[in-house]
Image (cartoon, grey):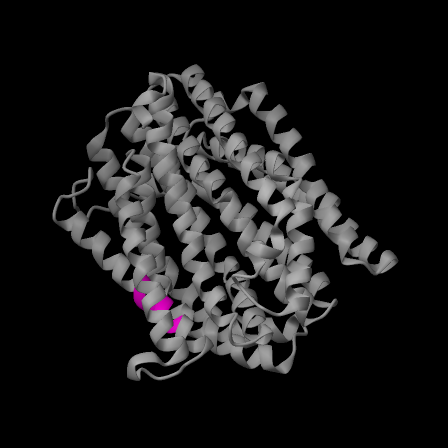
Amino acid sequence: MIQLFPKKHQKILKLSIPAAINSLLDMLQIITDLIMVGRISAFAVAAVGLGLQSLMFVFAILTLLHVGTSALLSRFMGAGQMTRASTGLSTLLRFAFFLSLPMMLLWYIMASHVYVWFGTATEVVALGADYVQTLTWMLPFVFVKLVFVTALNAAGDIKTPMYIKCASIILNVLLNYLLIFGNYGFPELGVMGAAVGTVIVNILEFVVYAVLYLRLKTPYIPAWHYSQSLLKRALKVGIPASFERSLTFGSFMLFTVIIAHYGTEALAGYQIGLRVEGLAFMPGIGFTIAAMALMGQGLGAKRPEQAKKDVILVLKYTIGFMFFLSFFMIAVPEKIVWFFTDDAQTIEEASLYLRIVGFSQIPLAYNFVISGALRGAGDTKRTLKINLISLWFVRIIPAFVLSWYFQSIFVVYLAMIADTFVKALWLWLTFNKGEWQKIKI
């Protein structure tokens, strides 16, 4: 099918389509927990949804590894420096493992306090604290696994992670079926069953990547080398990106505080709406991964103009995909939300969210691809500034004021999509100025 497209498009699509599918599968793996616990109660949905959202603080640290690994290794790949790429991978694998340990301990201790801070119902606190504490045991495997996945993406191998994720999705659904509901003699663990299944799947994914790496089934040479200089180069672009993501998730958590004041059904509806929207923009994130890799490879090969053309072509495809999906979010959100819950009030709240954000999918495509391209070029400080200013002065502060004045969740969501439009315009103007071409990693 890809062969039917012009040659210059084929390179983009061979990277973008598997990356989009892989990102979609990542979201599906999360959503399977929400769908299956949605048959228990709204409390279970709120507990799992808020638990996953709270773990985003930990995953913000993963951005350091993702952006640093991609920017560094894709440039080495573009320049044909395989030995340096292999040394960089070895260095980042070790760093990822040791970085995960304090994150694991911190979030295990903080799990119950997060739910109390949000002022959620007692039932949500009890279910959610156990859920998050169980998930923290997978963090070392997730951290190291992410470096493997990003390294393969940087080398242009998007299909291997896609195949592994397909298998893990099937296993995750099976484990949820057995452990959440207690089928075929397994214990009925409810929300805890979803957590246990997720931990098992992530450990097995790590094992598969480790075996492929050690058996020379990847483009990289297995080594135990450590390079302080290469680590510093990766951290130079990774730390600002991680800081940006931490601030983003922090603002999202504050945004969730606003939503939580409207009740458990509103919070559950918001969590489901986020996951459904996540399904819609996973293709966008997949194209973003391709944009990061193409930008890094183009700059590594000393071809910045070609890198810019590749990114713009990726953007065009992303806009097309997300524009198409926005129709379903606007026209039939109730039918989509029904897969997650049969609670009428929760369906109504989630549908309101989806209809509003459906109108912001095109600017969201700009946000994904252009910010990803700038990070691939190492221009993470500029994306940090744009994201920080827009989030606080267009989304969070106006949302608090509007919520206080109008007492309506509708105006809160309007502030959210206003941020998306402003950020898209700012990022596009920044990309067109071309200052990212001067950055050295």
The answer, for residue 6, to whether it is visible in the render is yes
The residue sitting at 37% across, 46% down in the picture is: 22
Compared to 90, does 154 lie above or below?
above
The residue sitting at 45% across, 18% down in the picture is: 309
Q: Is residue 21 left or right of residue 123?
A: left
The answer, for residue 95, to whether it is visible in the render is no
The residue sitting at 61% across, 49% down in the picture is: 332
Q: Quadrant of the C terminus?
A: top left
Image coords of residue 140 (percent x, y): 34, 62
Image coords of residue 91 (percent x, y): 28, 47
Most foreground residue, 296 or 72: 296
The residue sitting at 87% across, 57% down in the picture is: 405
Residue 85 location, quadrant:
top left
Most foreground residue, 100 or 343: 343
Compared to 359, does 110 lie above or below?
below
- Residue furthest to the left: 215
What number of labels is visible?
Answer: 0
Q: Main secondary structure of the magenta part?
A: helix
Q: Quadrant of the N terminus?
A: top left
Most foreground residue, 154 or 123: 123
Is 354 within the magenta?
no
Image coords of residue 198 (percent x, y): 37, 66
Compared to 129, does 347 lie above or below?
above
User: In the image, which residues are magenta?
Assistant: 195-202
Q: Is residue 331 left or right of residue 80?
A: right
Residue 33 location, quadrant:
bottom left
Image coords of residue 181 (percent x, y): 40, 78
